[in-house]
Image (spheres, rainbow, N blue to C red):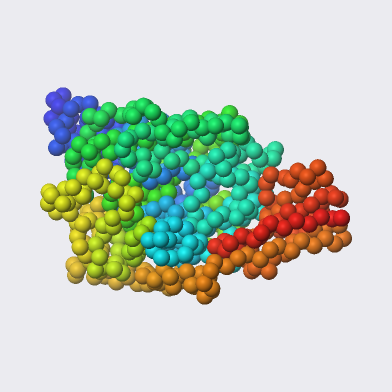
Amino acid sequence: MKKESRTIILTLIYSTLSSCKEELKMYLREVNIKPILLSLFLAGNLIVGCQTRPKNSEKENAIASSLQLGERPNILWLVTEDMGPYIPSFGDSTIVTPNLSRLAREGVVYPNLYSTSGVCAPSRAAIIMGMYPSSIGANHMRTTSYTEVTGLPSYGAVPPTQARMVSELLRINGYYCSNNYKEDYQFEAPKTGWDESSTYAHWRNRNENQPFFSVFNFTDTHESGLFEPYGLRKAETRHYHEGDRTYKWGADRLTEEETPVHLSKDTNFDIPPYLPDTPKVRRDMWKLYNNISEMDKQVGAVLKQLEDDGLLENTIIFFYGDHGGPLPREKRLIYDSGLNTPLIIRFPNKQLAGTKDTQLLSFVDFAPTLLSLIGTEPPSYMQGQAFLGPYKAEKEREYIHAAADRFDGFTDAIRAVRDDRFKYIRNYRPEQGYYLPVEYREGIPTMQELLRMRDEGTLDSVQALWFRDHKDPEELYDCTTDPYELHNLAQNPDYSGKMEELRTEMDRWLKEIGDVPNLPEKELISQLWNGAETQPRTAEPIITSANNKITIDCATQGASIGYKIQGKNNTATEVWTVYQKPFEIPEGSKVIAQAYRIGYVPSETVESSTE
């Protein structure tokens, strides 16, 4: 058969069998189709466009509801940074990811997960609390730094008094909770938040047969991995040396500038239209994929430990990124390029293996889902909804919401709402442009290239959109026909009905969570601190002993109390236990306690004894 005939046949197959996308794309390259034709085939799979999803069928929902998870399954979260859908299981076969591809084959792919912000700390606050960052004062990126620039005091998010980190709620339910090792929640985590949060934290440090919730954070794909001189973070990671506290890591970066290399620099990268196709940009694309491959190796290392421990088939495994991609006009923005991130979940015994769930998911859904998976009803203060487990919401979510406010020393105020096809954006500062001169981002060569071409006047009309000196007050994008959100339909009368629907939904959401966009940050801090000029302090815990039992109280409403028991030999337990009710200790022992209200200064530690 002639090459041209094969091309026509493959075109027809490609348009009807979406499940064969990756195999077809690789074959098209093998038969050496002309670049312009290949680009047409790849157009539906460009790396950071927003997607439109078909509704889950009733059959799919019924299958998902039949999962057999056990009463107390282990849960493992594998979290990478700055990660758009750049991997084969999400339509991009540029780099080989054997470990993530295995997870996808043995699990469920969720292509429609969205962060609540295009940057890590607010998004991580949403994940750990199950609440929108702008509802608890976690929406400004970096609340404890840049104080000289902003003139503001250092502060942390202050959730409602009944709110707890989801990991603390799991600890209360008997789970061993470990975090290795990044936190970055826009507040200092209380000692009650984790059994261990460190470079050595691991499920292997738990009590025998205790169920666990363990998080491993991978940093290889972070935007700083694109800086020059390029050198991958050292690959001998903490995951190989858990528990060995005498182990010392080497330098943060490899000495060999460009090793290990997982991808040819001559690869035909798909450059999104908002970036110029230049050697510097292509080099950054090469680094991006090279870093993903390194991250995949680390994922494999942790999965091997799980298998070696015989725990694979009673553990639910999540893989996801903390927001969208690392490149300019991706990270920090609330276009889908900054919000959409892959999610893969592998269930015990490969249940639902190789399937795709297209429902809309938000980071605020993670905490209630985690509780639902262990059979605990999510508390009412959580603003997300469970999408798995016995407390799964009756209806799939219709919309996801996102916000962008201050990034380092530069403030904006943007809100977004998206359904399964359309994205509506409201700009509360239309008089200022989208581009903010964030110094950290300007360490990326692609950003430097954009600025050079901007100053020379050589950006095309699409690439120049980001550098306009003002924004439209409202934006509307059809993510089916405009996957990069480049053509604003807000003034098109044909979409007036959709505009009204999404405006109404945004207003409802803002009112429900108490978000006041563009509120001066000084006023926000005053609200969080109840009008105080300095950060409130948690009251010291009061330890009392009666009838051979220890009781601990704290006058600060909503405070968590952690304690340790110190024996006669003056050695104390390593882990801070969450205080729940009176308990007994051996005679002559001491109790060491500390109280912590999230967003407040922690109390001093206090001691007591039974003598």
- Would residue 313 appear left or right of 358 to someone viewing this image? right
Residue 405 is at least partly visible in this image: yes
Figure quadrant of the N terminus: top left
Task: Tell me where residue 165 appears, x and y as whole percent.
Answer: 57, 56
Task: Tell me where residue 414 appears, x and y as whole percent.
Answer: 33, 64
- Residue 130 lies, with reference to residue 573, above or below; the image says below
Residue extending farthest to the bottom is: 531
The residue at the point 60 percent across, 55 percent down is 190
The residue at the point 50 percent across, 61 percent down is 156
The residue at the point 37 percent across, 36 percent down is 292
In the image, 521 versus 405, the foreground residue is: 521
- Would residue 482 appear left or right of 397 to someone viewing this image? left
In the image, 196 versus 566, the foreground residue is: 566
Residue extending farthest to the front is: 148
- Would residue 406 appear left or right of 71 to someone viewing this image? left
The residue at the point 48 percent across, 42 percent down is 217
- Would residue 523 appear left or right of 170 to someone viewing this image? left
- Residue 364 lies, with reference to residue 204, above or below; the image says below
Task: Tell me where residue 338 appears, x and y as whole percent.
Answer: 34, 52
Residue 197 in which image quadrant:
top right
In the image, 128 versus 61, the foreground residue is: 128
Residue extending farthest to the top is: 1
Residue 127 is at least partly visible in this image: no
Figure quadrant of the C terminus: bottom right
Task: Tell me where residue 248 appears, x and y as whole percent.
Answer: 54, 32
Say how many tags the image has. Answer: 0
In the image, 432 versus 415, the foreground residue is: 432
